Image (tube, rainbow, N blue to C red):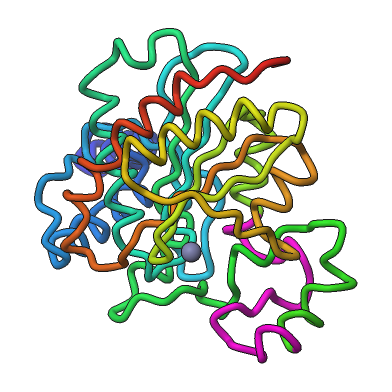
């Protein structure tokens, strides 16, 4: 009888599915990742970020076994806007800004009721979570030189060696689209078909724009206003083989705005959020004609 009970208990135990989720039904790898991220944010002095109340989705895993996460606000079809941060893991405040933006949107649902907003605040978690953060990913590749642009095979490695003096910080990889972090961004672009992309970097200190030339005048006027309002210069920096500006802006006609913050100092995170939050909100409302 006892043996039968043990057997029954064993079968019952085996039939119960193993818990696949951690706290609040967050997938276990995302839960673990959020714990590492919270630890890192704490070390950087970013104690005002509430990462747990945000519905994170994941797509792909990095070489360092970190999930690539994003969150989505609003269910509108079309006119999607995509925010990207932490593409270069050592550009610390870019991650803070987009984590803060995600929290701000979560707390202000009226801002996204009729919109579709996707935020991937940390595209290169392996670089960011390193003890000493790195620009490149765990394979030593610059994610912003790894997009499969039409000029990649002819120019990416050649220009990296000649113009970039083979600086390892800008290494484009041996072939385009080789990195999980690049494929993650491509998947977000294909899935959400954003009309606008805002990618946050540092520390060059300007706005840059790549995109269709048909609306350029009206957009440049808009950007000029934003530049004056936020007291942040506008500069045409151009694009590179394998860069997002080239892949999305130049080749796919998606309005791609790069915000280069003036410093990579993590202490500046909150100050930069205050400074650029109006630009983020105006970017959400910017109408793209023909879309
Ligand atoms: Zn950068």
Identity of the residue drawn at 61% across and 29% down: 194
Determine whether 260 is above or below 221 in the image. Answer: below
> Any magenta on residue 170?
yes
Q: Quadrant of residue 280?
A: top left
| Image location (x, y in percent) of residue 103 | 24, 33
Residue at the limit of the structure toward the bottom, as seen here: 165
Where does residue 136 sit, x and y in percent of width and height? 51, 74
Q: Which quarter of the rendering shows the C terminus?
A: top right
Residue at 76%, 78% (x, y): give it: 174
Vertical comparison of 41 with 31: above or below: below
Q: Nearer the viewer, residue 208 or 186?
A: 208
Considering the whole magenta stretch, tell me its main secondary structure.
loop
Q: Nearer the viewer, residue 172 or 70?
A: 172
Quarter holding the N terminus is: top left
Which residue is drawn at the image coordinates 71% and 58% (left, top)? 147
Question: In this picture, is 142 found above or below 192?
Answer: below
Q: Is residue 145 left or right of residue 156?
A: left
Left or right: where 134 falls relative to 239: left
The residue closer to the viewer here, 141 or 242, is: 242
Q: Quadrant of residue 290?
A: top right
Q: In the rendered structure, which segment of residues is drawn in magenta?
A: 162-182
- The x, y position of residue 206, in whole percent, is 44, 55
> Left or right: where does residue 287 sit relative to residue 104?
right
Residue found at the very far right of the displayed protein: 154
Q: How many numbered markers are drawn?
A: 0
Which residue is drawn at the image coordinates 39% and 9% (left, top)? 113
């Amino acid at each position: 009888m006892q043996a039968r009970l043990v057997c029954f208990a064993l079968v019952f135990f085996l039939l119960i599915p193993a818990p696949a989720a951690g706290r609040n039904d967050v997938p276990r790898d995302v839960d673990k990742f959020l714990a590492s991220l919270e630890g890192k944010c704490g070390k950087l002095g970013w104690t005002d970020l509430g990462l747990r109340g945000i519905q994170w989705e994941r797509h792909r895993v990095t070489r360092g076994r970190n999930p690539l996460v994003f969150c989505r606000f609003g269910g509108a079809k079309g006119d999607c806007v995509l925010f990207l941060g932490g593409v270069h893991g050592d550009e610390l405040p870019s991650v803070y800004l987009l984590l803060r933006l995600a929290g701000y949107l979560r707390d202000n649902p009226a801002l996204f009721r009729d919109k579709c907003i996707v935020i991937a605040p940390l595209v290169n978690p392996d670089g960011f979570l390193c003890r000493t953060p790195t620009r490149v990913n765990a394979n030593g590749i610059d994610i912003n030189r790894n997009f499969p642009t039409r000029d990649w095979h002819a120019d990416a490695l050649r220009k990296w060696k000649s113009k970039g003096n083979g600086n390892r910080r800008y290494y484009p990889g041996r072939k385009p689209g080789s990195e999980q972090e690049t494929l993650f961004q491509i998947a977000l672009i294909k899935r959400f078909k954003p009309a606008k992309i805002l990618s946050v970097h540092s520390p060059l200190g300007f706005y840059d724009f790549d995109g269709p030339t048909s609306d350029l005048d009206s957009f440049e006027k808009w950007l000029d206003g934003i530049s004056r309002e936020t007291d942040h210069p506008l500069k045409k920096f151009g694009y590179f083989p394998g860069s997002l500006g080239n892949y999305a802006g130049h080749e796919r006609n998606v309005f791609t705005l790069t915000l280069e913050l003036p410093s990579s100092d993590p202490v500046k995170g909150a100050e930069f959020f205050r400074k650029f939050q109006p630009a983020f909100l105006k970017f959400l409302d910017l109408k793209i004609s023909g879309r």
